[in-house]
Image: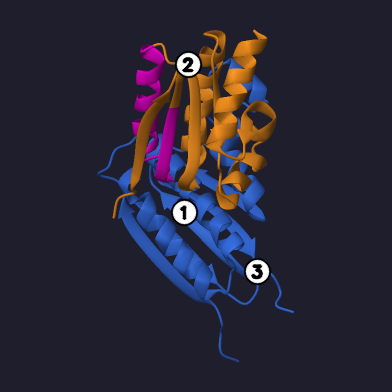
Amino acid sequence: MATSFAVERAREGDITILKVNGYLDAHTAPQFEKTIQEEFDAGHVRLVVDCAGLTYISSAGLGVFMSFVEDIREAGGDIKLCAIVPAVYQVFEILGFPELFEIVADRQTAVERFRVSAQEA
Amino acid sequence: MESVERTFQLHVPSSTENLAMIREFVGRVGERAGMDTTELTKLELAVDEACANVIEHAYGSDSTREVTVKATVDLDAVQIEIVDTGRGFDPSQVQQLDLDQMISQRKSGGLGMRLIKSLMDEVQYEIVPGQKNELRMVKRLKKKP
């Protein structure tokens, strides 16, 4: 019984949408890390992580966000999270993620936040 | 009087592939103890974090080793003991930084321990490196109205 996890990638203009599905734990975190690394290497630094299909996250998954976000922000981008189910949001909240990451209700809002910040810049 | 304490054990190879099985095991034990979904989620996550620490730190990702999860249920609580024979990992030695400091230093170690302490009611360690390391943690059961 291995953990199931998948990431679907899409682009909306210069924004990358990563739709994560399943269980993000110490077994699957390296796959997610590889995906974000590939996006970063390709110069894609405006990332929306759509968590609607994410049913579980442990610290290994949270660690992926933490290890990349500074480099991504320094490159002028950000990681915005959306559509987090309550059980998963609880884990983000315990560690204080809502103060350090932008978490919004849905994908469209996350995309719009990037567009607004681009206009303001 | 008949004892109401029941004990369940799971022995698995030390591989992150088995974390799903470990979560399912403790989830079923918690269900038997009458935990609700929120409490089950917390129990599963705490045990997942502890076992992931054993696999990665105590055993250095050597999948030929074994992790033992022992769960004891009584009327008041679920007690979990996680036993390994790897190099002792003392979580109190992990530097505790604020989340924003960790981000700026690109560090993510120690998050699991923070979660365990938030999710469980009691957490204790007994470390004898190379012989037996044991993490014991307790989740008290909510009293039914």
Q: Residue B91, percent across and down?
A: 56, 36
Residue drawn at (50%, 76%), measured in percent from left and top? B6
Q: Which residue is mark 3?
A: B141
> Chain A takes which shade in the image?
orange
Q: Quadrant of residue A102?
A: top right
Above/below status of A30 relative to B48: above
Q: Amino acid at mark 3?
A: Leu
Residue ranking furthest to the left: B64
Q: Amino acid at mark 1?
A: Ile
Q: Residue B18, percent across and down?
A: 33, 51
Above/below status of B3 relative to A79: below
Circle 1 or circle 2, nearest the eye: 2
Q: Is residue A34 left or right of residue A104?
A: left
Q: Chain of mark 1?
A: B
> Chain B takes which shade in the image?
blue
Asked whether residue B90 appears in the rendered view, the answer is: no
Q: Which residue is mark 1?
A: B82
Looking at the image, do the residues carrying marks 3 and 1 touch, with CB atoms under 8 Å apart?
A: no
Label 1 neighbourhood size at 10 Å, few (<14), some (14-19), many (20+)? many
Q: Is residue B49 magenta?
A: no
Labels 1 and 2 share a subunit:
no
Residue ranking furthest to the right: B145
Q: Which residue is mark 2?
A: A45
Which residues, given as a range, are shown in magenta? A17-42
Please name whichever residue, B124 or B96, is drawn nearer the observer in this view of the structure: B96
Quarter the N terminus of chain A occupies: bottom left
